[in-house]
Each structure stands twice: as C-alpha cells, then as structure tokens.
Amino acid sequence: MTSKKKLYDPKSKEPFKLSRTKIDLFIDCPRCFYLDRRIGIARPRGFPFNLNSAVDHLLKKEFDTYRQQQEPHPIMEEAGLDAIPYSHPNLDQWRHNFTGIQYHHPKTNFLLFGAIDDVWVLPNNQLAIVDYKATSKNGNITLDDPWKITYKRQMEIYPWLFRRNGFDVAETGYFVYANGLKTEPNFSNQLKFKTVLLPYKGNDAWVEEAVVKVWKCLQDRVVPECKNGCEYCAYRGVVGEVDGAGL
C-alpha cells in the first residue's frame, strides 16, 4: 500500500512530523518503518475497532463531566487515588490524532507527537497520563500479556513528550480498562462492561536513544534488514519468491 503521507527527505530543512505510533513501528521492525516513512510503502491497514472507538468517545465525555465539576471520578475513589481530571486549554489539541502533544526535537529536526486520552492532576500538582482501553475477555484484566508491551511504551512516550513541554509528570500513569462482559444471560441491545483502573509505573529513559536511532535509520540510503519474527516482511518475501518463480 502506497502511503499518502509526507515522506522523509534527509536534505529537507523542514521539521519532519513523526507520531508515537511510528516510533513503535520502528521498534517492531526497522525495515517496515523505513519502507513506510522513507519509501512510502505502508503496512496494510487493519480493520477499524469501532466498538473500542465508541467506548473511548463515551469515556471522554464522562470524564469531561467530572472535569467541569472539578471532582474525582468514582473509579478514582474506588481505587483510592486522590486525583481529578486536569483542565487545560490545549486538552482538545492533545487528544486530536493529528496534532496531539508535540515536541520539536532539535538534534533530529523531528516534530514528535502523540494523542493522549486524558490527563489527571494529583494533589502535588503533578500530572498523571491516562489511556483508555477496551476489550472483552474472561478473567481479570492485567498488563502482563506480552503484546501489551506496546501499551507500556505508549505510557512512557506520552510523559516524555509532556516533560519536554515543561510539565511535571508523575512516574505512574493509568489505564482505564473497560472489559465487555460475556456473562449476561442475553444481549437485549446492551453490552455491559466492568471497568478497572490499572496503574503503570513507566520509565522514559529509552525514548531519547530510540528517537536518535529512528533518525539514523531514515538517514541511510539502504533499506534495513528484516527483523526476525516480522510477519509482514515474511509475507512480502514469500510473495516475492512466487512472483519471481511464476505459477
């Protein structure tokens, strides 16, 4: 799939806009990242998670109500967390997928950005970054699944961006995790959820080095080798062999 987004040009003096998700793509597979941001060949798009988007939208409306009242949400009180939703004139911008919280990285000339779901403020005036998640599974929701490493990196890049903008951000962020229940006797045009609050103590020490590695990757004229285990690279390789051999 050919990307319509602006591609990286090593000779350009204009800041290059790079999202949090693209940094995650580089960590997942430098080859796929290079093909995307330098050549313009993106991975195939996944299906949209419309139910998840609906939960996200409704949670934002719900927390905004408590933001206007400057009161804690019940999930904070249930968890014993002393916090309230944070009010800031740039909140809508921070939440927008194509703007987010931004930082111009002078060494690489990247304009780095990431769209957050929410920010809470603690009694010591530190900010806590919050992300909403939705799923439907049996048992307790945890952050222990191996694939949730991407969620954890997400919760480390966002504080890094906020700190670069001069905000005092707490080490611990929070996932508001809504789990769709399968134990109801019937559907009856309703999907019920049990929502839990999961704290995550992150460490953003890796982000600076990763950003520089991304920059060095894009500076190179050679496409990186395939990262072991990348299903997309494996698929492209097999298709290439078939195309070359014919049927």
Image (cartoon, rainbow, N blue to C red):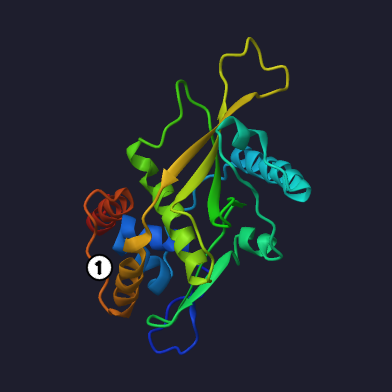
Above or below, 109 against 208 in this view is below
Residue 21, above or below 76: below
Foreground pick, 244 / 65: 65
Residue plotted at (60% across, 67% down):
99
The amino acid on which the numbered mark 1 sits, given as a three-letter code, is: Pro
Q: Is residue 110 in sight in this rendering?
A: yes
Q: Is residue 91 above or below residue 122?
A: below
Circle 1 sits on which residue?
224
In x, y percent, where is residue 237? 26, 55
Q: Position of residue 19 (x, y in %)?
A: 48, 65
83 in relation to 161, above or below: above
Image side of residue 209 versus residue 119, left or right: left
Q: How many marks?
A: 1
Residue 2 shows up from this direction: no
Q: Nearer the viewer, residue 214 or 42?
A: 214
Which residue is at a point 32% across and 58% down the rendered structure image? 27
Q: Nearer the viewer, residue 242 or 46?
A: 46
What x and y, as percent, mark residue 100?
59, 64
Q: How many C-alpha atoms fall within 10 Å of the one at disc 1: few (<14), some, or many (≥20)?
A: some
The furthest residue to the top: 185
Residue 177 at x, y percent in the picture: 54, 36
Residue 183, image quadrant: top right
Residue appearing at x 29%, y 76% in the figure: 216
Q: Secondary structure at mark 1?
A: loop
